[in-house]
Image: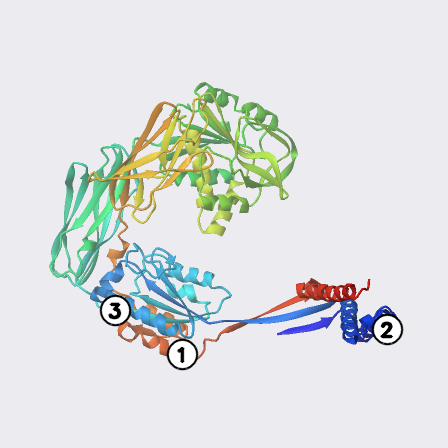
Amino acid sequence: MSSFSFQYSSWFLILCVVLAAAYTAALYYRDSIFSEKEVSNAWWKRIMSAARFALVFLLCVLLLSPFFSHRSTQTFKPIVAIVADNSESMKYGLAKDTSLFKQTLKELESVLGQNYEVVNYTAGDALRNNTTIDFSEKSSNLSTALEELNGIYYNRNLGAVILATDGIYNKGINPVYSTENSTYQVYSIAVGDTSIKKDQRISAVFHNKLVYLNDKFAVRADIESNNLNGKNTKITCYEITDGGTKSIDTKEITYNTDASFRSVDFVLPANKTGVAHYRFVLENLTGEVTYQNNVRDIYVEILDGRQKVLLVANTPHPDVAAFKSAIESNKNYQLDVAMAESFNKSLNEYNLIILHQLPSGNQKVTALLQAAQAQKKSLLFVLGTQSFPVDFSKAQNLVNVRGSTNNFNDVTAQVNKDFSLFTLSEKTLQTLPKLPPLSNFFGDYTANSSTKTLLSQKINNVTTDYPLWIFGETGETKTGVICAEGLWRWRNYDYMLNKSHDATNEIINKTIQYLSVKNDKRPFRVTLNKNVFQDNEAVIFDAQLYNANYELVNTPNIELEIKNETGERTKYSFSKTDNSYTLNAGFFAAGNYTYTATTSLGNNTLTASGKFSVSPLQLEELRTRADHQWLYRIAAQHNGSMHYLSTAKNIADEINNKNQLKPVLYDTFLTESAINLKWIFVLLLALLSLEWGTRKYLGGY
């Protein structure tokens, strides 16, 4: 629908008519040039008069600033989302009905598609927008899937959700709570058997992921059983090695009730460094619904020793607790904490010394600094309001601080995207600028030209060149400086923001890792962020290549070959980043793998190799009994109903008969000045051309 209006009163249109008529009359009816006999044809004169009148009239109208208003209406159908559980447990629940399940969902989509916009999703490890249902997902996180669905269709016309599942979830919270504030209808399609079947299973195996060479470590296996009263079985622990399978220990088990739970403890030796693979196997009993949950694999990383870190503080401070919590979250490190005034131990056993607000006015720690320098120990300085700027600047050569000891700044973190000493996850990089301010001296911070800046200071929303988190090397010694205090605030806010301390733990532990590890002068390195992956985690490699001047380069290509336990080999090529390399090799089946990377630099062929292991994620085998109670509850709470596969086709009729899902109309209004309309310009040009051409033809001017 369109309308035409003026900025000024429409009464001015009469004046436009008068002006156009007067101008036309003066030009054509008082001028005798077109009254001679040879041009006495009155039709030509009328055509020119009409063209001139229209031209002048339109020009006058345009002076009134007319504009067009256009209204368009769009209709959006209600959205119906069909969410199919794609986890492995569905195979047990559906048995031979998998084809019927898929066909039923297709028919629902076809019928509902006549009146609604139907979208298809699968749920398992995550919510995925696709129609491929193969029951391959390793876990069921239905609550997160529904939360993501709420986010995707926030402020959109989502009318109903059809959830087809066995009701088994092994990650996240009860899905009922994920839809508490949702207004759409929920219909559930319940599959699987809710009866208690004869079964035994290893429900969990508890163990340390990291142990140390020559230690003994405890492993606890939790075992559950149903309807096996009076049956005897045994559980055996095996060690899986390249040479085969070795039995380590066996425990006898007797089930005394229909529903039984017990824990069995093993003590295992750590005899060799690397990743140790253990398998726990329950002896199968006749009549079990499945034998797949009778086996559990675990992987334990055995290290030669921990890195020892010493933190010396000027006085007790919340930052000390923040460092302690972050460092001790990584089992590779052992932290000792001491106060400067009472510390007198040797530094021989430590790989890194953290000096918190030292040197200070009261504690110069001269002897400690001299001992660290003599033993080439890596140092991490934390500047704070108790530090003494002059002595602090002399104690390290990364940054010179000229500041007032009475005035302080609040500074936030600005990430340097060109930092290359180590990498932080994308989530951490996004979190750091959101964290609350740290405190430091008001003054000037001048960094050495050879330093590497991870974070710079942002003061009152102004990004500066002042360093906040920097690193440098002198010979074989590494040094780091954090130019502010208040990391405890970061940890608290990180938890409030992300429900975890992952971001602050990562930046602190990556700092500790870089500083505590001896310089690696190899020109070619390939690294993994860990050695043990689950089979639903992608294996990601990073690589660095250095030239003769020890500068990062990434001109040559890098090829990678991964070999599994059977000798099967797969080849990959690294992708180039700004100045290094990365490779997402994807997902691997459970087992042990070796890799070899190859590249060429000049006339030299360089190689790097290593190992990693993949542990099976066995969550879907733990529970085989369907759970329909919450499916009934969630449907009842959201004006829907629960159906079994045999009656699922009735959902479309229910939705249509309720007639509660209505389309949404969106009106769009567009206002445009008439002078911007191209057809107005074309019309004026046509009128002018018609009159001018006719006058010239008739001998006028």
Task: Between label 2 and label 3, give the one nearer the viewer.
Answer: 2
In the structure shown, which secondary structural element does the residue marked by tag 3 occupy?
A: helix
According to the picture, the residue beneath numbered tag 2 turns out to be: 29
Under mark 3, the amino acid is: Leu
Instruction: Between residue 559 and residue 503, name the one nearer to us.
Output: 559
Can residue 502 be seen by looking at this rendering?
Answer: yes
If you read the primary sequence from the N terminus, does the residue marked by circle 2 or circle 3 appear first?
2
The amino acid marked with disc number 2 is: Tyr
Discs 2/1, front: 2
What is the quadrant of residue 45 in the picture? bottom right
Picture coordinates of residue 584, whole percent (x, y): 36, 42
What residue is shown at x 18% (from left), y 57% (from top)?
Answer: 200
Q: Position of residue 118 (x, y in %)?
A: 40, 68
User: Which residue matches tag 3?
Assistant: 100
Q: Residue at x 35, y 75 (%)?
A: 651
Could you tell me how far apart the alpha carbons at marks 2 and 1 are, in whole angstroms? 73 Å
Q: How busy is the neighbourhood of tag 3: few (under 14 within 10 Å), some, or many (20 plus)?
A: few
Question: Seen in the image, is 454 located left or right of residue 241?
Answer: right
Q: How many marks?
A: 3
Q: Quadrant of residue 49?
A: bottom right
Quarter placement of the N terminus = bottom right
Say if mark 2 contacts mark 1, CB within 8 Å.
no
Badge 2 marks a residue whose secondary structure is loop
Residue that numbered label 1 is attached to: 656
Marker disc for residue 245: none
